[in-house]
Image: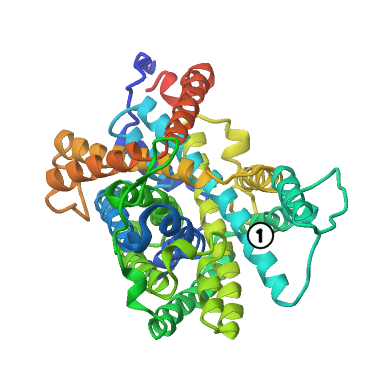
Amino acid sequence: METKLRPVNTSVMRKKPLSAYAADAQKSELKRVLTRWGLTSLGIGAVIGGGIFVLTGIAAREWAGPALALAFIIAGVACTFAALCYAEFASILPVEGSAYAYSYGTVGELFAWLIGWNLILEYMMGATTVAVSWSGYFEKFLHLFHIEPPIWLMNDPVTAHEKADALRAAGTAVPDFTFAMNLPAFLIVIVVTYILVKGIKEAASTNNLIVIVKVATVIFVIIAGYFFVDTANWTPFIPPAVVDETGQTHYGWPGIVTAAGIVFFAYIGFDAVSTQAGEAINPKKDVPFAIIASLLICTALYILVSLVLTGMVKYDTLDLKAPVAQAFADAGLTWAVYLITIAAIAGLTSVMLVMMLGQTRVFLGMAKDGLLPKNLFASIHPTFKTPWKSTIFVGTIVSIVAALTPIDKVSQLTSSGTLFAFAMICGAVWLLRVREPNLERPYRTPALPVIATLGILANLYLMWNLRTDTKITFVVWGILGLIVYFAYSRHHSNLNKPQE
């Protein structure tokens, strides 16, 4: 009997059939080894790191002042709306791919591609930012033992020459150099790449150990720092607004909102949990639990740390690179600086691990759908059962960019891609509830119309309040994504082939 083929749907709004997700899950070669708390640990591992150890200084000193706690609350609320929507999607479609996969089955291919494209900003560029931050804390660690590595081995070329010029201007002799790279950032990415290639179980075990260390350290910072809080440092809690020469408003309510957009980078790890659905033992129940649990735990810790930090040190004197460690050094707790610096190094390592893990799983989902080359992004190692080629590809790019590029504004660019994806997810889960009301939903987002609407508005509002140059870069990145989609992905999509 001759098989009849359905005609190809050429619309950019074509959707992946929900039945295809179940088929993908059955065909998956990934190992299902992650438990409920293993997934939660991955979420905490991705969230706690850059936000507490790096971005608090920038956000408080330049934008929010002591009201940094309010910025964390605003960002946390916006994330909570998205997390509740993510949880429902994760229970329906327990597959790798995160927001990209969810949108493909509900909104359509083009929107799914744009979300997947922006998740590259979230994961790959986020990992790059964290690698450079890791290098900064590692350098501080060396300084504790009076080890002074050469500038040209600890910084990208642009930053290295800037630091050298500043030292020469201050009367310090600095040897000339023609080559510079951030060697620690390069090497730590290579180490993380090796762990990820070896397997998800090894990566999860490494992450679990690091999570214990850094959560204990964060709790120590909160408890020990409490005894050194000077409430006078909280006055005024919301500093009066100041407009700089570029027209950007610092402090006041506009500064708090901008700070919320900056520290939003600190929250992006929770959605990495959903990228691990293909490796979860019971994804329909455990992934929603881990998404919400990791977000709530980390939000509480963030708010407490921000209050302690701005209480210990006047906001306008916070150190920009290592604010927590410097605050304890100023309080005379030199021994605590060692502990905090080591925990920051470990914490940032686990953030990199989960971000790069998430990126390769998003690539895997896109490649399975034909939107990216399968021989590179969907190739599973026969022994390790990991997408090894994709992992090495991501590791290579992240290591090179981290070693050679000054990325002082990448955290905001990372946030812009995440905010866009979160807003899209809030709309997509609502759309699916309308289109497929009888679909089995092990977890249902409460008061979905309200939660989804607030999630869309909150995330787009934070996105709108990012720096102007960040928004311009985001638009340019989006245009580049559209070019790639229409030049390659649309024609190679599985939905572009006749189906039985």
Q: Which of 252 and 182 is in front in this view?
A: 252
Quadrant of the snapshot with the N terminus: top left
> In the image, what residue occupies the spot 24% across and 51% down?
81
Displayed quadrant of residue 225: bottom left
Query: x, y percentage for residue 357?
Result: 53, 53
Q: Nearer the viewer, residue 406 or 392?
A: 406
Displayed quadrant of residue 190: bottom right
Viewer can see residue 59: yes
Viewer can see residue 33: no
Query: x, y percentage for residue 328?
Result: 52, 78
Q: Nearer the viewer, residue 370 or 185?
A: 185
> In the image, what residue occupies the spot 33% across and 67% down?
303
User: Which kind of residue does numbered mark 1 sit on?
Assistant: Ser
In the rendered image, the vertical position of residue 243 relative to residue 64, given as above or below: above
In the rendered image, the vertical position of residue 17 relative to residue 132, given as above or below: above
Counting other residues with Cα less than 10 Å from the Cα at mark 1, is it few (<14), some (14-19), or many (20 or more)? many
Q: Nearer the viewer, residue 378 or 361?
A: 361
* Lateral position of residue 346 relative to residue 238, left or right: right
Query: x, y percentage for residue 226?
Result: 38, 82
Query: x, y percentage for residue 370?
Result: 50, 29
Q: How many labels does the image show?
A: 1
> In the image, what residue occupies the spot 42% across and 83% down?
228
- Secondary structure at numbered mark 1: helix
Colour scheme shown: rainbow
Quadrant of the snapshot with the C terminus: top left
Q: Name the residue under label 1.
A: 135
